[in-house]
Image (tube, grey):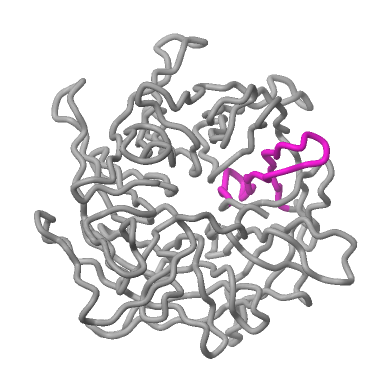
């Protein structure tokens, strides 16, 4: 599975002492990042949080770790805010994945549904009693009565056939509690699928999976990446490659015009990786109230990095139906002068059209375990007049002690940003942090 591979920019050995690690924050604004929790391999806790967090109704944070727990195959955890100001956040393992549960390795974060239900995916099934090992969609329901247990249910177990295999990205909760997601492969198309899971109409019934689209192509085929966005009756997402060997694309899925008909896929934009354009989007897109899409590409853009440092882009819908969408590069990362690069994480929308995101590497800190920088949290402020330039503000440079390698998109609640880092912290097994921009 792709999420278990370790690239050169992912594998890091964090060796540091208090005297060796210094945060270089010259010229940065006064925002203060707070490390809420550092993961470790001790005591049955999870470690390596590859997904982000979602925020619960009482300010709780929910997320997953790829490894750890009672059976070492990953966890779903809760971080509860302290009862008094300045107190410690309390971590609780809500669920430990293992062979007896039928699913292992939750590489993606969670989605929260009505009533506080949590939904997620695992990359491959692990029970020896099951005939297939292609991944699952699971549900965790909040405790009822006096119980403290979050019961898990497997909503769908992928077969590797027409229904796809290898889900690696967080789900999206749509109208009617339907779940939308992607798989990275399929024996039917070999290139992944977009699927929908519809809840049962009767209590105790099963969820129904429908494949809305299967990707195909030549050369380096398109593989759907990132969390899907829903706007009206349309679904938007990205592919890591293009149908004809391009370096990534943004697509739209439109529902059938007649009941029982097929969904229609339209490629809205093919990235080129040339002349400053981005390439290889790893995250999905977000959509604003006007239908404008925003996202990132991990490579392309400024050529100061080996394959380009990555960009933040927007796609504006055409004024006339059927017209061409317009791409605008909002920021091209440089990896220089404190700027980050490799934005695996997507962006999220804030008040006034501000965008927030993180880069996996780069930033001002250059030290043990962070030879390319430990990554940054950034803000992109829209121009004051139409056609002006967006302004990047670096909100935080990670230094390893407070985290290293933010990989997943941030969450915003009540004016506070929340996120995770894959590495760093007290045990170099990842962190959860907050930041008031």
Farthest bottom residue in view: 43
> What residue lies at 56% left-to-right and 28% top-to-bottom?
251
Q: Which part of the image, by quadrant, shows the C terminus?
A: bottom left
- 186 or 365: nearer the viewer: 365
Instruction: Say whether residue 320 is left or right of residue 238.
Output: left
Question: Number of numbered discs present?
Answer: 0
- 79 or 423: nearer the viewer: 423
Instruction: Say whether residue 314 is left or right of residue 119.
Output: left
Q: Is residue 260 above or below residue 406?
A: above
Q: Is residue 170 above or below residue 313?
A: below
- 432 or 287: nearer the viewer: 432
> What residue lies at 57% left-to-right and 44% top-to-bottom?
174
Q: Is residue 396 magenta?
A: no
Picture quarter containing residue 399? bottom left
> What residue lies at 58% left-to-right and 87% top-to-bottom?
146
- 101 or 113: nearer the viewer: 101
Q: In the image, residue 231 lies at what x, y percent? A: 49, 33
Q: In the image, residue 333 lies at what x, y percent? A: 30, 40
Q: Is residue 182 magenta?
A: yes
- Can residue 83 be seen here? The reply is yes
Q: In the image, residue 374 lies at what x, y percent? A: 33, 61
Q: In the image, residue 259 lies at what x, y percent? A: 76, 25
Q: Which part of the image, by quadrant, shows the N terminus?
A: bottom right
Instruction: Say whether residue 306 is left or right of residue 148.
Output: left
> What residue lies at 35% left-to-right and 54% top-to-bottom?
361
- Can residue 60 be seen here? The reply is no
Q: What's the magenta region? A: 171-199
């Amino acid at each position: 599975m792709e999420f278990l591979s370790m690239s050169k920019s992912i594998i890091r050995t964090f060796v540091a002492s208090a005297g060796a690690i210094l945060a270089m924050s010259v010229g940065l604004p006064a925002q203060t990042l707070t490390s809420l929790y550092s993961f470790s391999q001790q005591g049955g806790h999870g470690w390596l949080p590859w997904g982000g967090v979602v925020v619960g109704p009482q300010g709780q944070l929910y997320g997953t770790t790829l490894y750890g727990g009672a059976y070492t195959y990953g966890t779903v955890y809760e971080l509860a805010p302290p009862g008094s100001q300045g107190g410690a956040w309390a971590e609780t393992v809500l669920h430990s994945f293992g062979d007896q549960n039928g699913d292992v390795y939750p590489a993606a974060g969670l989605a929260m549904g009505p009533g506080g239900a949590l939904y997620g995916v695992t990359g491959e099934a692990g029970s020896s009693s099951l005939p297939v090992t292609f991944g699952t969609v699971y549900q965790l329901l909040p405790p009822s009565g006096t119980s403290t247990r979050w019961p898990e249910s497997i909503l769908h177990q992928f077969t590797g056939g027409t229904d796809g295999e290898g889900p690696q990205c967080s789900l999206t909760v749509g109208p009617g509690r339907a779940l939308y997601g992607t798989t990275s492969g399929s024996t039917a198309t070999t290139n992944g699928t977009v699927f929908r899971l519809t809840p049962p109409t009767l209590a105790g019934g099963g969820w129904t999976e429908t494949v809305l689209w299967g990707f195909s192509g030549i050369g380096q085929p398109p593989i759907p990446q990132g969390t899907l966005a829903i706007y009206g009756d349309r679904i938007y997402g990205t592919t890591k490659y293009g149908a004809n060997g391009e370096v990534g694309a943004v697509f739209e899925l439109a529902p059938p015009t007649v009941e029982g008909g097929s969904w229609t896929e339209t490629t809205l934009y093919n990235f080129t990786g040339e002349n400053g354009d981005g390439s290889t989007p790893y995250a999905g897109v977000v959509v604003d109230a006007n239908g404008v899409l925003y996202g990132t590409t991990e490579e392309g853009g400024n050529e100061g990095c080996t394959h380009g440092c990555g960009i933040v882009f927007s796609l504006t819908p055409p004024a006339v139906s059927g017209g061409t969408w317009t791409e605008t590069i909002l920021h091209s990362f440089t990896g220089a002068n404190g700027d980050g690069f490799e934005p695996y994480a997507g962006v999220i929308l804030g008040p006034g059209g501000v965008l927030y995101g993180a880069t996996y590497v780069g930033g001002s800190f250059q030290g043990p375990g962070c030879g390319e920088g430990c990554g940054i949290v950034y803000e992109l402020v829209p121009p004051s007049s139409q056609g002006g330039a967006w302004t990047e503000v670096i909100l935080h440079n990670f230094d390893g002690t407070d985290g290293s390698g933010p990989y997943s998109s941030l969450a915003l609640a009540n004016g506070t940003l929340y996120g995770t880092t894959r590495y760093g912290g007290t045990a170099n097994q990842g962190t959860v942090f907050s930041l008031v921009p």
